Image (cartoon, rainbow, N blue to C red):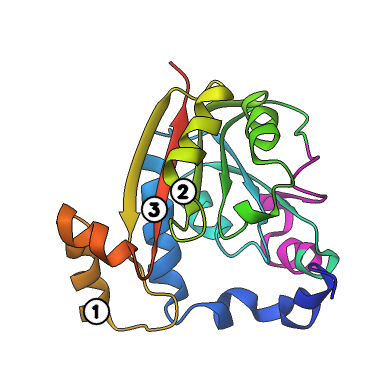
Amino acid sequence: MNTTAKYGPQAERWTEEAYADPYGYLARRARIVVELGPRLEPGDAVLDLACGDGGFAEHLLERDLRYVGVDASEAMVEAARRRLGVRAEINLADLNEFRPEQPVAATTCFRAIYYARDRAAFFRHLASFTEKKLVFDLNPRQYRVEDVQADLRAAGFDRLALRPFFAPQRVGSRPLSAALAALERVEPLARLALCFRFSYLISAARS
């Protein structure tokens, strides 16, 4: 089945139905995108690859960041344009090939790094127009962290910051979310938890 066509029927309410607590989950992700690695400042442009219906954009726009979204699903792009209107630029394109008209401060890629056809080439491509940092999530049970870090360094990203991100997508319990956020800061337990669930967030920048 086409990987973009499968999202068509879900596009209209993707954000609302993909997360148990959409606001809490995406707001926390936005805060980390701003703070992890070189800090983003108001007015900075963020390119969000695999943007879906643009639900994440709301939280970046609230922080006075400029937003450019890219998705390969026509239905998702249409939903994002309806959601965001003139507040953001949304493009229909393959994340492996898209190049913004102007450089951006940050590029993000969430739940989609596996769409990179050649990861090393993908990172080099992003490095050519990303001025401050690349931020993405990484499942350590799917990819070896050391291999991904090596590809980032080969692309010129020599300042790497990595942190666990234990935010439940399907359970909207505030006590659970708070407990998992606290667990992120306990390094031995966090490493153990990552053997079974959750992801790292990685910020990659250049000196």
**Mark in the foreground, 1 or 3:** 3
Q: In terms of sequence position, does the residue under pointer 2 or pointer 3 come before the other?
A: 2
Secondary element under disc 1, as helix, strand or loop, is helix
Label 1 crowd (10 A; few <14 / some 14-19 / many >=20): few
Q: How far apart are marks 1 and 2 (CA)?
A: 28 Å
Q: Percent position (x, y) of residue 127?
A: 62, 26
Q: Percent position (x, y) of residue 139?
A: 47, 58
Q: Percent position (x, y) of residue 92?
A: 83, 53
**Mark in the foreground, 2 or 3:** 2
Q: What residue type is labelled 2?
A: Arg
Q: Is residue 15 above or below residue 61?
A: below
Q: In terms of sequence position, does the residue under pointer 1 or pointer 3 come before the other?
A: 1
Q: Percent position (x, y) of residue 118?
A: 71, 41
Q: Is residue 200 above or below residue 55?
A: above
Q: Where, quadrant-wise, is the C terminus in this rendering? A: top left
Secondary element under disc 2, as helix, strand or loop, is loop
Residue under label 2? 144
Instruction: Name which quarter of the figure residue 146 lies in.
Output: top left
Q: Where, quadrant-wise, is the N terminus in this rendering? A: bottom right
Q: In terms of sequence position, does the residue under pointer 1 or pointer 2 come before the other?
A: 2
Q: Read off the magenta span.
A: 77-98
Tell me what residue is drawn at x 67 percent, y 56 percent: 50
Side of 65 where 36 appears, left or right: left
Q: Front-most of 83 and 197?
A: 197
Instruction: Give the label on residue 176, or none.
Output: 1
Residue under label 3? 200
Q: Which amino acid does label 3 sit on?
A: Tyr
Instruction: Name which quarter of the figure residue 173 lies in.
Output: bottom left
In this rendering, does residue 173 appear at all?
yes
Q: Front-most of 18 and 22?
A: 18
**Mark in the foreground, 1 or 2:** 2
